[in-house]
Image: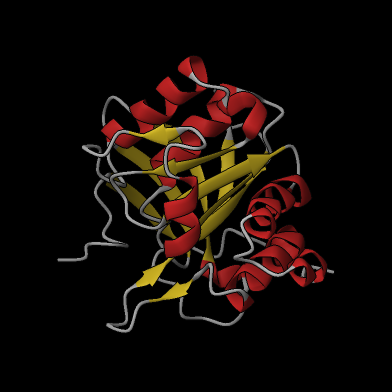
């Protein structure tokens, strides 16, 4: 049974218009490009997949905040500010986070939070699905263990392991062996994260070179 998109963390959600349109202009450009490439979309049964985020200013405790696409928005051809959530705090040990927005944060938000915590220079994260590219990259780039399910503290902890035990800080891309089709890329900017992902697709001849022009 596919449980893609099911929120597995404890979510303290304040339903409010927390995000201004100007704060997601660039994010939406890249998100819509990924949707055009079917890297963010939905399965035939209506379950959405894929998400992306961008670092926001620090919270009062000095911890990173980030804006992330809301849960179950994969079917939408474009997003508005109302389709994002602002994650204000997250706690891996407690499997919990707080967020604001008209939608709850993506089910993979804890993993995004862990990635942002690894290096303050990381400002953008993409989580997409592509069955054939996933198969090509499996164990060729940093890969999480197959026993680790998505959207759990274990996946977030496994991501931390990849940062310390593999060349993930340099490669900026990894695949989730226990989350079929799932690929994550990140970078100092949305452009770097996007180009890291797309260049792998071009090298494996699974994504056309024209994809590099889509966000512009």
Coordinates of residue 190 in the picture (x, y in percent): 73, 50
- Above or below residue 120? Residue 183 is below
Report whether 56 appears left or right of 177. right
- Above or below residue 146? Residue 126 is below
Tell me what residue is drawn at x 50 percent, y 37 percent.
140
- Examine the image and state in which quarter residue 27 appears: bottom right
- Above or below residue 141? Residue 205 is below
Coordinates of residue 57 in the picture (x, y in percent): 68, 37
Q: Nearer the viewer, residue 120 or 65?
A: 120
Whether residue 22 is visible here, answered yes or no, is no
Coordinates of residue 40 in the picture (x, y in percent): 51, 69
Quadrant of the image containing the C terminus:
bottom right
Find the residue positioned furthest to the top. 164
Report whether 29 appears left or right of 205. right
Quadrant of the image containing the N terminus:
bottom left
Total marks drawn?
0
Find the residue positioned furthest to the left. 1
Report whether 58 appears left or right of 162. right
- Examine the image and state in which quarter residue 17 appears: bottom right
- Above or below residue 71? Residue 153 is above
Q: Nearer the viewer, residue 155 or 9?
A: 155
Coordinates of residue 147 in the picture (x, y in percent): 21, 37
Tell me what residue is drawn at x 82 percent, y 68 percent.
213
Tell me what residue is drawn at x 45 percent, y 44 percent.
175
């Amino acid at each position: 049974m596919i449980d893609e998109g099911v929120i597995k963390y404890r979510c303290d959600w304040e339903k409010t218009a927390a995000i201004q349109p100007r704060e997601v202009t660039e994010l939406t450009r890249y998100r819509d490009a990924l949707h055009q490439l079917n890297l963010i979309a939905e399965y035939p049964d209506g379950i959405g997949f894929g998400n992306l985020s961008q670092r926001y200013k620090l919270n009062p405790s000095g911890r990173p905040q980030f804006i992330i696409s809301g849960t179950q928005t994969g079917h939408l051809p474009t997003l508005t500010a109302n389709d994002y959530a602002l994650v204000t705090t997250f706690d891996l040990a407690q499997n919990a986070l707080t967020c604001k927005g008209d939608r709850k944060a993506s089910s993979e938000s804890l993993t995004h939070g862990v990635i942002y915590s690894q290096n303050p220079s990381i400002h953008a994260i993409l989580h997409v699905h592509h069955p054939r590219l996933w198969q090509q990259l499996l164990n060729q780039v940093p890969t999480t263990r197959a026993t680790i399910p998505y959207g759990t503290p274990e996946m977030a902890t496994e991501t931390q392991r990849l940062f310390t035990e593999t060349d993930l800080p340099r490669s900026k891309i990894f695949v989730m062996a226990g989350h079929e089709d799932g690929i994550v890329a990140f970078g100092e900017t949305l452009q770097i994260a996007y180009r890291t992902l797309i260049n792998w697709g071009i090298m494996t001849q699974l994504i056309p070179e024209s994809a590099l022009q889509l966000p512009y």
